[in-house]
Image (cartoon, rainbow, N blue to C red):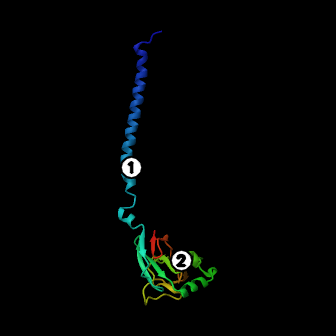
Amino acid sequence: MSTSPEDTKPVQDETKRDFLYLTAASMGAVAAGSVVWPLVDQMNPSADTLALSTTEADLSAVQEGQSITVMWRGAPVFIRRRTVTEIEEARAVDVSTLRDKETDEQRAKRPEWLIMTGICTHLGCVPLGQKQGDQKGEYGGWFCPCHGSHYDTAGRIRKGPAPKNLVIPPYEFLTETTIKIG
C-alpha cells in the first residue's frame, strides 16, 4: 500500500500548526514577563532604604545612667545604659499588674543596656526622658506629654492611654561596645 502526497499533507499541516501555537505562546509569555517584571521589581525597597535596614552604634562613650538616640529606619531608637537602681526597680515590678506583661529580662538582653524604639505606642509621638532635665514621668523612665503615657525604667507602659510597651527592635551585640540594630 503506497501513500499518496495527499495523505502526508494533513500531518505536515498539524505539525506546522502546533509549532506556530507553541511559538506564539512562548512569545506571548516572554512579552507578558517583560511587562510584569518591571512592575513587580519596582515594589522592592530602594537602595537608600536598604542601606537603612541596619544601624550600628558604638556604646563605648555611654556612661552608666546616660542615654543616646540613634536613627534606624527613620525612627529614633533609645539606648540607655541603666544604673543598678534602675535595673532593680524594673525587676521589682509585679508583672501581673502591667497592661503589657513583659519582664525586664524579656526586654533587655544585657541588664545594663535597654534598647527600644522611641515611639509612643499610642499615637506615635516621641516620649521625653532621653535628655538630662527631661520629664521622665511617674516611673522614672519616659513620658509622652501629648497624651500622658508614663513608661518605667524598662520602657513598659505603666499609666496613660498607650496600649503597649515601647517596642524592642531586633538587635545584637557585635562586640562588648558595638550593637547592630535590624
Where disc 1 sits, the SS reads: helix
- Residue 179 image point, x, y percent: 46, 73
Q: Residue at x 40, y 28 (%)?
A: 17
Q: Tell me the amino acid under the disc marked 2.
A: Arg
- Quick check: 68 above or below 35? below
Work out whether residue 100 can be spotted.
no
- Quick check: 60 above or below 29? below
- Residue 67 image point, x, y percent: 45, 83
- Residue 51 image point, x, y percent: 38, 65
Report the residue that reaches farthest toward the bottom.
133
Report the residue that reaches farthest toward the top.
1
Q: Residue at x 57, y 75 (%)?
A: 106
Residue 163 in which image quadrant: bottom right
Specify which label sits upstream in the sequence, 1 or 2: 1
- Quick check: 84 above or below 44? below
Residue nearest the viewer, comparing 131 with 178 = 178
Q: Which mark is residue 7?
A: none
Q: Residues within 10 Å of mark 1 (few under 14, many from 20)?
A: few
- Quick check: 77 above or below 86? above
Residue that label 2 marks:
110
Q: Residue at x 40, y 58 (%)?
A: 44
- Residue 77 image point, x, y percent: 44, 76
Where disc 2 sits, the SS reads: loop
Q: Tell me the amino acid under the disc marked 1.
A: Val
Residue that label 1 marks:
36
